[in-house]
Image (cartoon, rainbow, N blue to C red):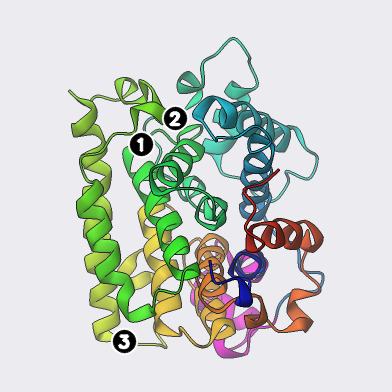
Amino acid sequence: MTAGKRPATGAMIGLALGDALGFPTEFSTVAMIEAKSGPWRGMELPRPAFVTDDTQMTLAVGRALRTAAERSPLTPLRLLRPLREEYVEWWRSPENNRAPGRTCLTACALLSRPERVWQQASQPESKGCGANMRVAPAGLVPALDEPTRAGVAQLQAALTHGHPTGLAASDLTAYAVRVLAQGARPEEMLPLLREYVAANRSTYHEHWLGDLWTYSQDPTATHYIERGWDECARVLDRVEQALAERDEEADPCLVTGAGWVAEEAFATGLLCFLLFPGEPVTALRRAAHSSGDSDSIACLTGAFAGAYLGADAWPARWADGIEYGDELRALGGLWDGGGLGG
């Protein structure tokens, strides 16, 4: 981590700002958004700046990591209990009224039954963006080594979304956040991401996932996880195409996808960041003024931009008014200070 710029705080505040900016535009066409909010470059943060389940569940992952770290080293068993408890608590909360995804609701209801192993709650056909819109903490905790970071990223996704692309896209999202926080340059991102996909294509993290793959129709664990990484590789091609065409005024969902599924949310969020790497507010506006899952796309864009630029990337008039701001800053400050959690 580059502690001086406070990348973890920047990412946590950025993802919440993107979430809040995209909350009112989700489920709307570009024409509908423009009629309501005006041209995309002039979008302003709503007041009050309420967030969605994207930020709520990101905080759940962050709190679970903090709890699990009270007894190091971090292991799947030490993370599983607080992660499961945080997801169920979110499901039961009266604040869970921000248009949450069906997969998360279904899986969390099943996770609330203690007699079920978590793999029985996971939804094997779902690769919705709920798998990776909440994964940023896995990329921000500085003490995690690479295998542990990958395992955390995939486990937090797998509790609800059992499709291999949900796991791979979550792992790739957390990796992107990690390398940006460590100082990777925007122009390096696509080569780094392609290298990561290739290196991990056949790696099934049995230590973290157990027998999850057997709930699918795949003949082997390797076949299962390769399906996910191959979809991530293909969506990186679409990001490259969109950057080559570079139409800043076009709906970013047109090439990289609407973001309802995990790999497209990752790709479109990354695209918006890479179009405007030095203009974080512009990147958020481009992401939120889109025809797809605007809050999740902008949430991911904010995580990337904040990890790259740090906490000072966000104007105070926006950052000071975001919902859950104190908790977002507390977790970010802990990780910027080098802590795992406890």
Q: Mark 2 belongs to which amino acid?
A: Gln
Q: Mark 3 belongs to which amino acid?
A: Arg
Q: Residue at x 56, y 37 (%)?
A: 104
Secondary structure beneath label 1: loop
Magenta run includes residue 88 = no
**Residue corresponding to mark 3:** 246
Compare residues 24 and 295 and report the one nearer the observer.
295
What secondary structure is the stretch in magenta mostly built from?
Answer: helix
Query: Residue 302's quadrant in the figure?
Result: bottom right
> Which comes before the other along the chain, label 3 or label 2?
2
> Which comes before the other along the chain, label 1 or label 3?
1
Residue 147 in percent (x, y) is at 38, 43
Q: Quote the CA–CA distance across marks 3 and 2.
A: 36 Å
303 left or right, relative to 247: right
- Looking at the rendered structure, which numbered label has been put on residue 163? 1
Compare residues 291 and 122 and report the one nearer the observer.
122
**Residue corresponding to mark 2:** 123
Q: Which residue range is magenta in the image?
A: 19-44
Neighbours of disc 1 within 10 Å: few (<14), some (14-19), many (20+): many
Confirm or deny contact between disc 3 and disc 2 (CB under 8 A): no
